[in-house]
Structure formats: structure tokens, C-alpha cells
Image (cartoon, helix red, strand yellow):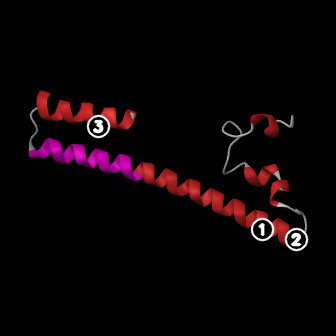
Amino acid sequence: MAAALIFILTYLYVEKVKTPNAHSMANMFKKLQLLSSAAFSIGHGGNDAQKVMGIITAATMANGDTADIKEMPNWVRWPATPPSVSEPQRWLGRS
């Protein structure tokens, strides 16, 4: 919702307040392309962390250290889900 509002306000500013020319439009698209590629990189990195978490859990289960996926150690879970986001009481040992 906020992204749509920002897009609409930016469009109105560029089209109605500031007269666009080829140079200013090219600069705007360069900045927007940089922003979108940064957002894509962050999303892709999050998927990598979850994939590694699954591989480590499978390895601990194959070794016999973990019997069930629900018994996954916290040090495996932390890189993909930081304590500020999920289950803060559990991370603090107050489960």
C-alpha cells in the first residue's frame, strides 16, 4: 500500500510539477533500477540462508544428533530467523 502511494506521488511530481526531459528520466530510471536490484539481492540472500538451514538440519538428522525437525538446535535456526522476528521467548530460553 505504501509503495503504491509513493509511486503515485512520484509520478505526479515528475509529470505535473517538474517538466521531464530525457536526461532527468534516464537518471530516475537508473536510480530505480539500483533500488530494485538491491531489493532483489536482499530477497535472494534470505532464501540462501533458509536453504543452508535445511541442509545443516538434514545433516544433524543423518548423524543422529537430531531425531525430529522440531528439535533443531537454535544455532541452526538463527541465521534465517533472527530472534527479533520470531519467538523471542524461546530464543531467550524461557519456553
Q: Earlier in the sequence, mark 2 or mark 3?
A: 3
Callout 3: 10 Å neighbours few (<14), some, many (20+)? few
C-alpha gap between disc 2 and disc 1: 9 Å
Q: Residue at x 25, y 30 (%)?
A: 9
Q: Any mark on residue 16, and which?
A: none
**Residues drawn in magenta:** 22-37
**Residue at x 76% of width, y 55% of height:** 76
As drawn, 95 above or below 68: above
Give the mark count: 3
Query: Does dot 3 land on a helix, a strand or a loop?
Result: helix
**Which residue is at a point 80% across and 69% down the rendered structure image?**
59
Amino acid type for the residue under numbered disc 1: Ala
Q: Secondary structure at mark 2?
A: helix
Single out the mark in the foreground, 2 or 3: 3
Q: Is 87 on the left-hand or right-hand side of 4?
A: right
Disc 3: which residue: 7
Q: Which of the marked residues, 1 or 3, is nearer the chain's N terminus?
A: 3
Image quadrant where one finds the C terminus = top right
Q: Is residue 47 left or right of residue 65?
A: left
Task: Residue under label 2, please give it.
Answer: 63
Give the numbered dot on residue 58. 1
